[in-house]
Amino acid sequence: MDIDEKVENEYDSSAIQVLEGLEAVRKRPGMYIGTTDVKGLHHLVWEIVDNSIDEALAGFCNNIEIIINKDNSITVKDDGRGIPVDVHPKTGKSTVETVYTVLHAGGKFGGGGYKVSGGLHGVGASVVNALSKWVEVKVFKNGKVHYIRFENGGHTVEPLRVIDTCEENRTGTYVTFKPDPEIFDTDIYDYNTLMVRVRELAFLNKGLRLTLRDDRDLDDTTGETFLYEGGISEYVKFINQGKTPIHEDIIHLEGEENDVMFEVAMQYNTGYNENIYSFVNNINTHDGGTHEEGVRRALTRVINSYARKANILKEKDESLTGDDVKEGLTMIVSCKHPNPQFEGQTKGRLGNSEVRKLADNVFSQGFEKFLLENPDEARAIVEKAMLACRARNAAKKAREITRKSDLAVTNFFGKLSDCKSKDPKVSEIFIVEGDSAGGSAKKGRDSMTQAILPLRGKILNVEKNRLDRALGNEEIRTIITAFGTGIGDEFNLDKLRYDKIIIMTDADVDGSHIRVLLLTLFYRFFRPIVEAGHVYAAQPPLFRIMHGKTRKYVLDEAEKEAYLATLPENVRQRAEIARMKGLGEMDAEELNETTMDIEKRILRKITVNDCMLADSMFTKLMGEEVEPRRKFIEENARFVKNLDI
Ligand code: 1YM
């Protein structure tokens, strides 16, 4: 702003320096808060909250309240010691004013203790001031309420003064700021964005009460309080909600060395995903770093050595890898460090090498003890990793098979009639039941964009939850090759060669069986493809209704009745209704018209829910008894159609 001229007249030399400092922030806000979009706007809140968190970490603050005010200004209150109000020897002004007007103030001015919370190491308050239309600070200290106000990028308009008295033992800092609309693209705060981070801060700082309140709609004030006595253990529990843990108790370990605090909480669930999040001084270290490396290294080593000693992992068995032991693992790693070194392009990696050893020591000692004291849980964890190991080897085998063998390639191309287009966005693959339907589909397709893969009967056998069995099956190998995504830990959705994978099976018992098997296969090994909405079931019609020159295909009895009801009485009387044949009996033209033509066909998108249902059906289907299986298949013959899509 045009403060430079003003400075000459109204401020002494030290003040000139001060204002030039804040002016630098206004000139290049990105250097201090990253961006001036909605993200930067929210960043301001964290800069102020960080000061309260530091005060909490120093052991003086238990409650922090964040309020979104009606005018989209933000108030942050804490019950810490209150920012010092005495005159600062270097600036000759109050320390509060110094903290809010001098860049790089913070810790240097406070003396004693270290700052471990995230943010700009103390420059936060002055940066927020520089980028605000106005800021008010109230400090409760020594039985008095102290007040100071800044405007237009950090100009002190009301120097610190006492405006009231308060109880002698009451202390704390209240800050309200209004972001400068000249700096930010938007001035509207998002409750949910703030809530998610406030909740995370509560998880990461056990025992600290954080409240978020939204006062913008005064008739309907919303707010939540977060307080977790269990800290990151409760974070793990929160993430594992809705998952099935394989051991009840969350493992929580912590240790400290040379003012560096290290903490980890973990629990395995029956899923296959890894949920490992690490933090340094409450900041998410997206790219990990030494704290995470230490834990990962120790986790692999301890599980292997326990598994060998307990003879769960036999001599002939290969050792488990880091990938094997992280399957189904939810873990939070948190490190509080007085002098963290952040590395990498986005500074998302902790570099301090001494932390690796601390993390390894704390984790390996605690985790080994846990395994020895809880043999049942230990066995469950080891066996889970061994299954992952088997799956990994199977995936490797799959890669070899789908990549090299000339024989497989010949076989593969013998089966698949690929489309000419190599553009996945327009390509589709029909997985068709039986060779004869496959033949018709080949003739009836648009060979530019439609590929046909015929399957011969019920030969898919995804008997176990693991890849190795499934890969024994040639049809499955063909599917993997056709999709192009790879499988297991090499799976890559971006390599999918088709936009639509269309299952085309008859509406009878056999068709239903094949559909169930395919959905199960997708659910277990290609779930991201289903999640991304690439899988469809074609719906061959059951009836053809002809009247005059019109030919209408309808899916089922109900649709037939509904359609007939729309026809005039005389037309309806003369309408010819034919029950359609199975896919295999349709000629190419019929098949094209009813099930493949992009304009006329009916597709149903398959969801993960459908696949889950199929998966549980499959488990029943593979039971020992033949009769219930037969019955089950019959009863569910048309289940895909009845699914709620
Ligand atoms: C709503 C924002 O800023 N709280 C806060 C800040 C400070 C202290 C307490 C504090 C720190 C120290 C001593 C110290 C700060 N003080 C300074 C400085 N809440 C909020 N609560 N006494 C009080 O670090 O030694 C900077 S921040 F520099 F003045 F000490």
Image (spheres, helix red, strand yellow):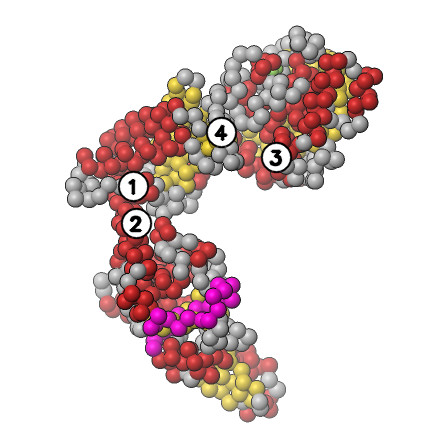
Cα separation between marks 3 and 4: 16 Å
Residue indicated by mark 3: 34
The picture quadrant where one finds residue 631 is: bottom left
Earlier residue among tags 2 and 1: 1
- Of the 4 image quadrants, the one containing the N terminus is top right
Q: Nearer the viewer, mark 2 or mark 4?
A: 4
Residue 458: x and y, percent? 30, 70
Earlier residue among tags 1 and 3: 3
Residue indicated by mark 2: 392
344 shown above or below 407: above
Cα separation between marks 2 and 4: 33 Å
Question: Which kind of residue does numbered mark 4 sit on?
Answer: Phe
The answer to which of 210 and 477 lies nearer the viewer is 477
Earlier residue among tags 2 and 4: 4
Question: Which kind of residue does numbered mark 2 sit on?
Answer: Arg
Residue indicated by mark 4: 342
Query: Who's the residue at 52% across and 85% down the image?
Result: 545
